[in-house]
Image (cartoon, rainbow, N blue to C red):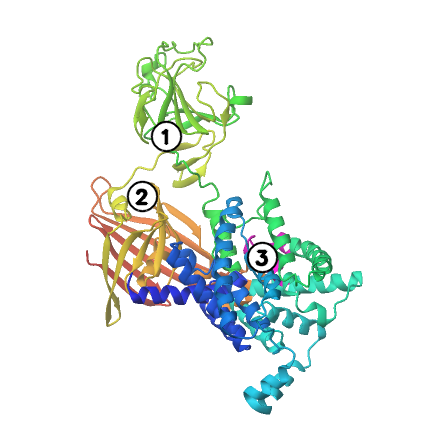
Amino acid sequence: MNLKQNAKLLYEGILNSYSQVFFSKNKLFGIILIIITFFDLLAGLSGLLAVVITYLAGRGIGFSKIRVSEGIYGFNSLLVGLGLGIYFEPGIPFFFVLFLASLFTLFLSVSMEGIIGKYAIPYLSLPFIISIWLIALATSQFEALGISQRGIYTLNDLYVIGDKTLVNVYTWWNDIGIPSSLRVYFFSLGAIFFQYNLLSGIIIAFGLLYYSRIGFSLSLLGFYSAYIFYMIIGANISEANYSYIGFNYILTAIALGGFFIIPSKLSYFWTIILIPMVAIITISLSIIFSTFNLPIYSLPFNIVVLLFLYVLKFRTKSTKWLTDIFIQHHSPERNLYAYQTNSVRFKYLLDTSIQLPFWGEWVVSQGHNGEPTHKEEWKNAWDFVITDEAGKQYKGKGDLPNEYYCYEKDVIAPADGEIEQIVNGIEDNIIGDINLENNWGNSVVIRHNNMLFSQVSHLKKDSIKVKPGERVKKGHLIAKVGNSGRSPYPHLHFQFQSSPFVGSRTISYPVSHFILSKEKGVELRSYQIPELNEKVKNIELNPILKNSFHFIPGKRFLFKIIRGENVTEEKWEVITDAYNNSYLQEKTTGSKAYFENDGNLFYFSRFDGDKKLLLYYFFLAAYKIQTGFYNYLELRDKFPVDLLFNKRWLFFHDFFAPFFFFLKADFHIQYSDIDNPLSPEKIELVSRVNLKFFRKEVKKISFKLILNTKGLGELTIMINNKKITALCEN
């Protein structure tokens, strides 16, 4: 790694260490917080040195450069450095102790990540508390360390630095006429960074408002919930002994109301309920630790947040109104918007992708909980048959098995797996007869994972092509449809189960993607249960669609972009990172469009970067693509609103978003044209994005995407009657 890249990581590590105190990775917010800490020069310098020492030590020891640069370890060292810088005078002994304290805090952070992290909960600021307590107790014996007098003679210190003018500014800010409760709120914010003045708190409040409207509103909710509770119980809320610990309520509210839990009505409700608990713990611990002459710092915040998050792990059922974060976006708003969108898009997203166990169009002759046999333990199963235009299952009189359209048709593996059990020697029944002795007839059970098995039954004798222990891929030929077992006429029985034996109790498990034939066209169904009398089939892959969206790592794209008379270029590359995340990256800016492709469905999941790029518009245009072509097939989806609305719209929306959305961004795509269904060379897809304020459309972006045998061909974009054309050059 070159010097420039190392410098960039150090820069990010420093800024993130500051903003992580508020669970953020916002760079501007980090800069604001750095400035705040230098209101006390030595404290600011000590905090910065602690962060740099932690970063360099973390990289030098060999910890993850990503974790170190994200400030995950640095923010605890920052707090330790600020605390030491406030309490002690500068000198060689002080900086030596600071160095050791930074290393010790790093070791605590990494250790707690391993100990507490295995329960999927954060360690918060516990390393800071433990480290600064131990150092505070030990330094009582360090005679070379001098206790700082700066806080005692603040006005004198300011006079020396900036004469009477600085004293007047400081006095004016601290004497500004605001309600006493709001004054305590600002002092509490400043106290997070050991800055005990009004100006620091006001600047932090504005920085918090810039970073997160939800976070800002939660900080007020948490603080005033505690303030009211103190008034109700008659506890002392005077500024002298309260402002130093008020940040416990602020941080608790932000953490539980919107950062570690998806912001919602219920998360706000639990914030209000839990804040009095924080207050009680704060009061009791203050009494206990005063005997050791130790401040409690953020211990109450840590206790309640960790306790609540740990308790949630024992829920037997999660509710959509109180959902812990699975993928952390380091912003309450982004967490909420991503969750709201993905809970619709990927509601039934499963580890094992399942297709129907046949080719062509079949009809569900008996569905889940259907008559006569899909009952009780075997209710979650299907029977499939093939019918003609008249709805008949057979030709002729239907007296013989081979007169039925589905008889001897191929049965295929619905997913990758291993053959677990087969039954292959049972004769087919004559039409109308059944074999109750061998109820399931010839059958195959496939293990897809340790908890998911599939079974196909009523197969033809000696038609099974696989053996127990054999590995099969999705679509692998398994057997032929027969009429064995409890089967009066040829049909295919299909079920999922959690054990490997023929005839096991069934479980409900959806088919990942299938095409539903309707009177007027077709419809894509994803992660749903085919129902009685529905005509269904697997997606028949179109070679152009499949090739166009088969983005393999290392593949590059060059686009010529035409905006009126202005012609520019844009280069993309397909990358898969160490965490197996695949994305298209624009070479100049590093902007990324993350995607998934399960072979049947291609979809974009996230965009990070410049929203003026062609890559961003391609992300919008091809947000969801299924790789089979069906004339006039329409797909719909939803975008996270923060991807499309500007900051002015979002600023007001963010305050209300935990309770209701008045902004919406919808996606719609239509499979509009194919030049030759049998041997296609060109496909046209038309898509659009609709932005809505309540139900009123406020903006529309239209796209036309042309694909050819080489892959991506041409993308046309229409925004406010302005046309942009992009041609793929490779």
Q: Is residue 660 visible?
A: no
Please determine whether, in this image, residue 730 is positioned above or below residue 538.
Answer: below
- In front here: 515 or 332? 332
Q: Is residue 718 left or right of residue 177?
A: left
Secondary structure of residue under mark 2: loop
- In front here: 406 or 458? 458
Main SS, magenta residues: helix
Q: Is residue 641 left or right of residue 611?
A: right
Marked residue nearer the N-terminal end (3 or 1): 3
Q: Which residues are magenta?
A: 250-268
> How many numbered discs, if any?
3
Q: Is residue 721 visible?
A: yes
Give the image quarter of residue 88: bottom right
Q: Which residue is mark 3?
A: 130
Q: Which residue is mark 2?
A: 627
Residue 414 numbered tag? 1
Marked residue nearer the N-terminal end (1 or 2): 1
Q: Is 113 in the magenta?
A: no
Specify the amino acid type for callout 3: Ile
